[in-house]
Image (cartoon, grey):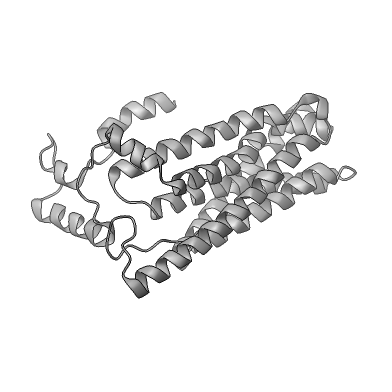
Amino acid sequence: MTVLIGFAAFAFIIDFPDKVLNSNRPFLTKAEVEIIKFRIDKDRQDSEFDPVTLAKVGKHLADWKLWVYALLLMSCTIPSYAFAFFLPVILNQGMGYSIIISQVLSGPPCILSIFMAFTIAWYSDKTHLRAPFIALQAVITIVGLALTGYAIDNNGVRYFGVLIGFAGAAGNVPTCLAYQSNNIRTDSKRSVGSALQIGLGSIGGIIASTVFRQQDAPRYIPGICVSIGFQILILVLITIMSLFFRSENKKQKEEGRVLEGYEGFRYTY
């Protein structure tokens, strides 16, 4: 299904504004294209296509912030992948539910995560903040994981831990993606940063698949501890980034420092 949607994307994903008029099926007038370019340039001076070259890849990979964004996403995906991969097993072998009931009970955490993600996205955009919401969801994930691993005598409490743990972890994935997108410029840097971020996010799936082991049932303490440890890493990294961004924005305002190669750019934290 993913591959099929990928092929369909060639027909539906919108190209850069300056290329729309040259396409076989332009759907914007020249005046509308100029309005779009003006809005993009006013925001980040980023409306023209910026080709990716090896030199640019090396330059962008030397930016330590891209690695932090990638580590943040990896830390989010570990519990998210763990719940996605192993939740029926945890419910069956860890909590004693039948195979059918385990499959049924695997659905509500996914549904709750949708509401969590949309709610966080709305408040995050309304307040123009990212870091506090990343930290909040990391804390929710920690609480959920702790309840899942340590409330061993009460399946109801453990399942509640699964609900909020999965919702916090899954909801943090788009928040971390937006966090990077808000704080980088140029198409080439966005391409390199996205590849690095998604790549490390996939490594989170590999970690999740190895730390939740069948022999650790019914509590799966090694996997729980590893997942909690990476949520603590999120809190540490987001604190460092917030302090750094606050300092850089202050210098931009008081000293006129140019951030991300664009005068007037300010970091979102």
In the rendered image, is residue 97 in sight?
A: no
Q: Dividing the picture into quarters, in which one does residue 225 lie?
A: top right
Q: Vertically, is 122 above or below 58?
A: below
List x then y, in percent, for residue 136. 62, 58
In the rendered image, is residue 6 in sight?
A: yes
In the picture provided, is 27 more to the left or to the right than 254? left
In the picture provided, is 194 more to the left or to the right than 96? left
Q: Vertically, is 88 above or below 110?
A: above
Q: Residue at x 10, y 39 (%)?
A: 22
The foreground one among 184 and 34 is: 184
Q: Vertically, is 181 above or below 43?
A: above
Taking the view exactly as shown, the residue that stands out farthest to the bottom is: 254
In the picture provided, is 122 more to the left or to the right than 100? left
The foreground one among 58 and 24 is: 58
List x then y, in percent, for residue 251. 39, 69
List x then y, in percent, for residue 206. 60, 28
Q: Residue at x 62, y 38 (%)?
A: 78
The foreground one among 60 and 161 is: 60
Q: Dividing the picture into quarters, in which one does residue 9 lie?
A: top left
Taking the view exactly as shown, the residue that stands out farthest to the right is: 153
Q: Residue at x 44, y 37 (%)?
A: 196
In the picture provided, is 153 more to the left or to the right than 159? right
The foreground one among 245 and 43 is: 245
Question: On the rendered image, what quadrant is the N terminus found in?
Answer: top left
Q: Residue at x 62, y 54 (%)?
A: 236
List x then y, in percent, for residue 155. 84, 43
